[in-house]
Image (cartoon, rainbow, N blue to C red):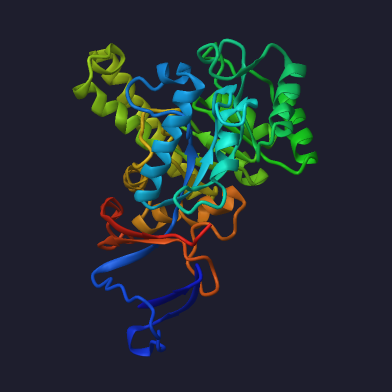
């Protein structure tokens, strides 16, 4: 196949024996390569670097966090990621515009229209029950009224959607009831925005499913009843299986006891089996499935979305199904109809890889050219 791009728009797609005259256009020999839509990292944290000390990095200064984001943008762009769905950033005084809000919002605004940066949709900061994650990383609510107020504050600050945190201080109990979350969902929907929610445990996922959030992040523990409710309510899920795979590598490459001890290794192995089964179940029942690295907020890095595609195939998806979860299906979750698609008349946001990712997901590691539409 041949593709003609002019002015950042795909003018035509033709078999090689039916090409139109391209005039004096630059001709790029892509023999042996596959053209892939610009991918969507559906779960990212632009301001954080990730790695084995990802939690500690959340307390870096705002200036440092913004520098992390600049580096992450370069990593994403060069690895074939065109869209970044940021699902949580620390609040701080932005070193560029001086505003105190989630730092991802200023980055989104400044990067808009610059081809070297990904397109960004950002949730603002995490909204949590006090004591759920390290102090200072998120905005914390003590009660349901504060939960609602702080969630709407993210929209007031300019967030595109909002992110709740449904793993609480007590791992055996969800931090909010379905009724409390449903109240937030109704208020956010009234403002024309969507609600997504971190839920790594079954109790939080059940609350999300009953409350009718728009999307569940991670979904490491899902059962048939939870998935049934997700299907009934049209709730999507975004997988981050590669986070757990990165924990496995930490067992050999770090001295951190939670990863290296026999007990830690066993917990990670059990988490992997549960997460893989949960995503497989959700996909089999027709839940809309997106995928992301969770870089920054987790241990992955910004240029490792290919790892998530590979992990999805380990969970039972065909390679082309896994690729859909980081292209057009992720675009559907994002609410961006142009994201993750290649079509005549569409934006020329695609990249080229050596090999065929429809049958071999490892081809996504072999990026050799990106061709983003200008601005």
Relative to 33, is 327 on the left or the right?
right
Question: Measured along the vertical axis of the image, is residue 102 above or below residue 214?
Answer: above
Q: Is residue 141 visible?
A: yes
Residue plotted at (38% across, 39% down): 302
Residue plotted at (70% across, 31% down): 157
Relative to 334, is 84 on the left or the right?
left
Relative to 10, is 207 on the left or the right?
right
Q: Is residue 277 visible?
A: no
Q: Quadrant of residue 357?
A: bottom left
Residue plotted at (74% across, 17% down): 146
Q: Quadrant of residue 123?
A: top right
Residue found at the far left of this picture: 252
Give 37 or 58, whichever is nearer the viewer.
58
Residue 40 point in image, percent of width and height: 47, 49
Please state, as top left, top right, bottom left or bottom right, where the N terminus lies in the image: bottom left
Residue 365 point in image, percent of width and height: 28, 50
Q: Quadrant of residue 121?
A: top right
Question: Measured along the vertical axis of the image, is residue 358 above or below residue 362?
Answer: below
Residue 150 point in image, percent of width and height: 71, 22
Residue plotted at (50% across, 25% down): 201
Give 66 or 11, whichever is nearer the viewer.
66
Question: Measured along the vertical axis of the image, is residue 14 above or below residue 78?
Answer: below
């Amino acid at each position: 196949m041949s593709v003609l791009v002019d002015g950042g728009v795909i003018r035509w797609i033709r078999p090689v024996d039916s090409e139109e005259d391209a005039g004096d256009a630059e001709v790029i020999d892509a023999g042996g390569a596959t053209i892939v839509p610009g991918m969507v990292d559906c779960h990212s944290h632009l301001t954080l670097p990730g790695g084995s000390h990802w939690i500690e990095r959340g307390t870096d200064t705002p200036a440092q966090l913004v520098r992390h984001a600049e580096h992450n943008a370069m990593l994403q762009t060069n690895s074939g990621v065109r869209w970044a769905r940021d699902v949580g950033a620390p609040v701080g005084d932005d070193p560029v515009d001086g505003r105190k809000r989630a730092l991802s919002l200023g980055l989104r605004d400044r990067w808009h229209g610059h081809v070297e940066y990904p397109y960004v949709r950002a949730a603002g900061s995490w909204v949590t029950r006090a004591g759920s994650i390290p102090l200072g990383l998120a905005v914390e609510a003590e009660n349901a009224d504060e939960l609602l107020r702080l969630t709407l504050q993210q929209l007031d600050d300019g967030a595109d959607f909002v992110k709740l945190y449904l793993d609480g201080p007590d791992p055996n109990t969800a931090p909010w009831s379905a009724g409390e979350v449903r109240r937030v969902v109704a208020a956010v929907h009234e403002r024309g925005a969507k609600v997504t929610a971190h839920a790594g445990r079954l109790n939080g996922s059940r609350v999300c499913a009953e409350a009718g959030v728009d999307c569940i992040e991670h979904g490491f523990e899902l059962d048939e009843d939870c998935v049934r409710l997700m299907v009934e309510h049209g709730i999507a899920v975004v997988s981050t299986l590669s986070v757990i795979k990165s924990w496995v590598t930490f067992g050999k490459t770090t001295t951190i006891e939670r990863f290296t001890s026999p007990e830690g290794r066993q917990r990670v192995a059990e988490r992997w089996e549960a997460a893989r089964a949960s995503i497989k179940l959700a996909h089999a029942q027709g839940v809309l499935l997106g995928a992301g690295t969770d870089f920054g907020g987790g241990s992955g890095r910004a240029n490792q979305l290919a790892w998530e595609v590979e992990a999805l195939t380990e969970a039972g998806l065909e390679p082309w199904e896994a690729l859909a979860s980081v292209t057009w299906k992720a675009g559907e979750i994002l609410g961006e109809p142009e994201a993750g698609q290649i079509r005549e008349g569409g934006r020329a946001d695609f990249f080229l890889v050596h090999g065929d990712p429809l049958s071999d997901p490892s081809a996504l590691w072999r990026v050799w050219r990106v061709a983003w539409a200008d601005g």
